[in-house]
Amino acid sequence: MADTTVDGASSVLANYGLKDNSSKTPTGSQLGKDQFLQLLVTQMNNQNPLNPQDNSEFVAQLAQFSTVEGISNLNTSMSSLLANTQSSQALQASSLVGRKVVVTTNTAVVDTSQTLKGSVNLTSPSENVYVNVYDSTGAQVNRINLGAQSAGQISFMWDGKDSSGATAAPGTYTFEAQASVDGQSTAMTTNLPANVDSVTLGQNGGEMALNLAGLGSIALSKVQVIGQ
């Protein structure tokens, strides 16, 4: 009897132009639309002719089949969208490698033969703003005085020279921004340039990360400016 039922289900499936996958095991424990339809057809073939299935129950089961099919199509569409997103990320990544970006940090790898351009995130008006520059040993190299400033992003430049006017050695430097607010010295964050050494693509739709010289990895969303 069981064999006759399976053959009947296969015949109905063939009439609807559907492939009989009864011999295949669904991936994991998930019920695919083909398996769902096989169960529905088998149920119809084995119903009691004296007490057939209620029309409302049959319509409800057809609605469930439509839902299963819709979810399957949605999964296919999402997989295609994810593949397109990863391709777009790869193209974007190739254009970023070797370029400069500006990020919120207090450390930068500086070529002292060129002028470094940065900015201070000043949260309140200040009577006096300045930026201390320290080398990799922690020794203060210079101080950049910016004077009184209104709140906002305050630009500054360092010409790569120490306090005596001599050109400092290239390398990693720390920039400490301080502002006088209500008579107290308050630390402020700085935005500094960095070179993009490489890019790590996001996995499963995750965000792309930039690997910056001297700073390590940072999410693309944290970048303030690209191509300074």
Image: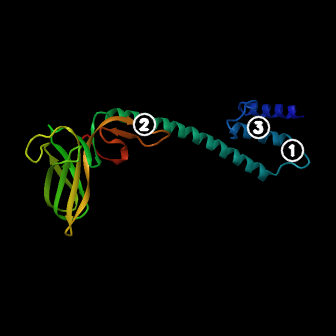
- Residue 59: x percent and y percent? 74, 49
Kind of residue at disc 3: Gln
Q: Which mark is nearer the camera, 3 or 2? A: 2
C-alpha span from label 3 to label 1? 14 Å
Q: Residue 185 location, x and y as percent?
A: 21, 63
Amino acid type, label 1: Gln
Q: Quadrant of the N terminus?
A: top right
Label 3 or label 1, whichever comes before in sequence order: 3
> Image point 44% across, 39% down: which residue?
202
User: Which callout, 3 or 2, points at the residue further toward the start of the chain?
Assistant: 3
Residue 18 rendering spot, x and y as whole percentages: 71, 32
State the residue in front, 165 or 120: 165
Under circle 2, the secondary element is loop
Residue 94 location, quadrant: top left
Helix, strand or loop under label 1? loop
Q: Which numbered tag is attached to residue 38?
A: 3
> 179 above or below 102?
below
Q: How far, Cα to Cα, is label 3 from label 2?
A: 42 Å
**Residue under label 1:** 47
In the rendered structure, find residue 201 and report the number of the disc placed on it: 2
In the picture as drawn, the residue positioned furthest to the left comes out as 165
**Nearer-the-camera pick, 118 or 77:** 118
- Asked whether, in this view, residue 171 is left or right of residue 147, the answer is right
Decide which of 26, 100 is in the foreground and name it: 100
Quadrant where the C terminus is found in the figure: top left
Count neighbours of disc 1 (C-alpha within 10 A) and say few if under 14, some if 14 to 19, many if 20 or more: few
> What residue is shown at x 27% (from left), y 36% (from top)?
99
Q: Residues within 10 Å of mark 2 (few under 14, many from 20)?
A: some
The amino acid at mark 2 is: Leu
**In front: mark 3 or mark 1?**
3
